[in-house]
Amino acid sequence: MVVLNKIYTRTGDDGTTALGSGERVPKNGARVSAYGTVDETNAAIGMARLSTTATEPEIDQMLARIQNDLFDLGADLCVPDHGEKLEYEPLRIVSAQVDRLEQDIDQLNAELEPLRSFILPGGTPAAAALHVARTVCRRAERLIVELAAFDDEPVSDAVIKYMNRLSDFLFVAARYASDRGKGDVLWVPGQNR
């Protein structure tokens, strides 16, 4: 259980932070940047939920579950699996969480017409907010993939898959929230030349 009774500790005043394993690392390190951007994704989803709660309850319920998953994912990244024995079993993203995202994507996408053009972010306030969350999610995904490229920075395949599916989910959810795709703002190549 997490207990936070004192918010400031002063231990990070030197520019370091503690991973879940207790190891101290620079706050600008690749791992901290990756899970920090996952947290930013979660905050963007929280902002999107201000629009989906009343207008898209089905999506909102999915987003609530995703926000919890993102804390799991951050916990996974916060305790790198270097193979050492820890005093506790670290929380890891599992394939069932990825599978659930795929089911949600398929459920929402079943009501949408196929795309014949790229779409511009917008449509409705909920759709626009979901597009913002999608772009933050893509940044987090890039940082996680960058982290995984280091030999000494293990990242599970499930973490990478989850973030990739999440950005897909956010795209489909944005279309769904844009009047089931009828409000999509289509890109017109070269329109303003």
Image: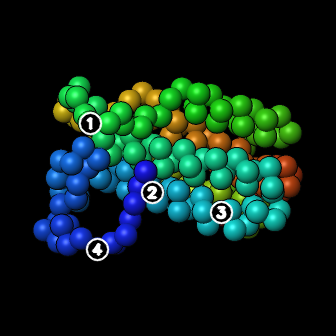
Question: Looking at the image, is mark 1 or mark 2 earlier in the sequence?
Answer: 2
Determine which residue is flagged by label 2: 39
Disc 2 versus disc 3: nearer the observer: 2
Give the SS element for disc 4: loop
* Residue 59 picture location, percent across and down: 75, 50
* Residue 141 picture location, percent across and down: 44, 43
Q: In this orientation, which residue lies closer to the viewer: 18 or 132?
A: 18
Q: Residue at x 32, y 46 (%)?
A: 78
Question: Looking at the image, is mark 4 or mark 1 earlier in the sequence?
Answer: 4
Residue 139 left/right relative to 192: left
Q: Residue at x 36, y 33 (%)?
A: 89
Would you say the residues marked 2 and 4 are in contact, meaning their CB atoms lie under 8 Å apart? no
Label of residue 48 in the image: 3
Residue 19 left/right relative to 58: left
Determine which residue is flagged by label 1: 87
Q: What's the amino acid at mark 1?
A: Glu
Q: In this orientation, which residue lies closer to the viewer: 187 or 132?
A: 132
- Please identify the residue farthest to the left as the structure is shown: 14
Give the SS element for disc 2: helix
Q: Estimate the spatial distance between the alpha carbons at disc 4 and disc 1, rounded to whole Å.
A: 25 Å
Q: What's the amino acid at mark 2?
A: Asp
Disc 1 versus disc 2: nearer the observer: 1
Disc 3 versus disc 1: nearer the observer: 1
Would you say the residues marked 4 and 3 are in contact, meaning their CB atoms lie under 8 Å apart? no
Question: Looking at the image, is mark 4 or mark 3 earlier in the sequence?
Answer: 4
Disc 4 versus disc 3: nearer the observer: 4
